[in-house]
Image (cartoon, rainbow, N blue to C red):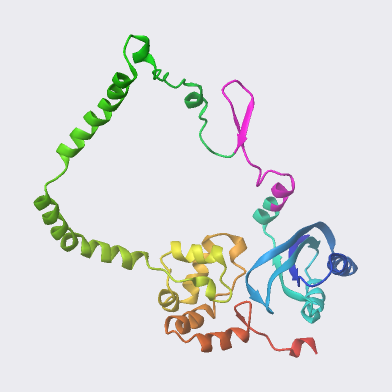
Amino acid sequence: MRQYEVTFVVGPVLPKNEVEEKAKKYTDLLKENGCEIVHIDNMGLRQLAYPIKKFNSGYYYCIEFQSENGVAIDPVELAMRRDEELLRFLTVHLDKYGIKYNEDKREGKIGVARKIPKKDGTEGGRGRGRNNSKAAAKPAPAAKPATEANSEGGNKDAAKKEAAKPATKAAAPVAAAAPTASATNKAAADAPAAKAPEAAAKDNTTATDNLVKIEGIGPKIASLLTDAGIGTFAQLAATDAAKVKEILAAAGSRFTMHDPTTWGTQAKLAADGKWDELKKLQDELDGGKAAKGSDEEE
């Protein structure tokens, strides 16, 4: 049996009970086409990576199922394509790694915070922070009583003078170590000429654009591209789509479903500052992909 999962996003304007009925509708449709349901994950209302149909959020559902030969996928996807209340949907064939990941996630082996044990054997807080029990147990040095001078036969004025002496002594070395005015001016005059080329080179290497403006690219994919040296619209426009696919494939199976075919064209318009043309192109796309015709639905 082959294993698949279909993830779909429902618009946020529907009541919660209607969203659940819609999820049940597609679950029943899968069963009617001979599929065995493995798991249904209601991920709730989530923020979208970019606006879809003027919505910024949607209800996410993921149905994991088994099918003998995958013939049930076509009628289910056709029904989803005709459903105007769905914002997006995606069907993925799971390999053994994807199946194992989903099983571990359901069993709680993934996404559980580690508890840090204390020195006395009891459980500490969650997270990966350092155990500061030693620092907390170390007592602070006792402060010298302010009335100690009076207890030794002195008066209040003498105690104030003694308290003022450490501040005067500490300030003297700082004043002595301060550079002269001529030395400071010389250093200020020399510093920009010596460090300007390095600073300019650093700015050029770290300059990036907001790649999320490209339809089909979310924050995680933008981070992957930036780590691979593609951090600007111009760099993305100059990168072949096949190379981008290699970067996505190297990051794991969850990214291989994305199609970067139009990203270069969008990036070129963004790099040239042609935002109106970019908006017009994105209106014709479907999640960053070229929109398919409706012939297959008729």
* Residue situated in front as seen by the camera: 119 or 144: 144
**Residue drawn at (76%, 87%) of the image:** 296
Compared with 105, 237 (above or below) is below
Q: Position of residue 185 (x, y in %)?
A: 13, 56
* Quarter where residue 147 is shown: top left
Compared with 55, 199 (above or below) is above
* Quarter where residue 11 is shown: bottom right
Compared with 36, 48 (above or below) is below
* Quadrant (top left/top right/bottom left/bottom right) for the C terminus: bottom right
**Residue drawn at (34%, 14%) of the image:** 149
Is 113 placed left or right of 79 in the picture?
Answer: left
Q: Position of residue 293 (x, y in %)?
A: 70, 89
Q: Position of residue 80 (x, y in %)?
A: 79, 76
Q: Which residue of the protein is positioned furthest toward the left in this rendering? A: 182
Q: Which residues are magenta?
A: 102-126
**Residue drawn at (77%, 79%) of the image:** 81
* Residue situated in front as seen by the camera: 112 or 101: 112
* Residue situated in front as seen by the camera: 206 or 180: 180
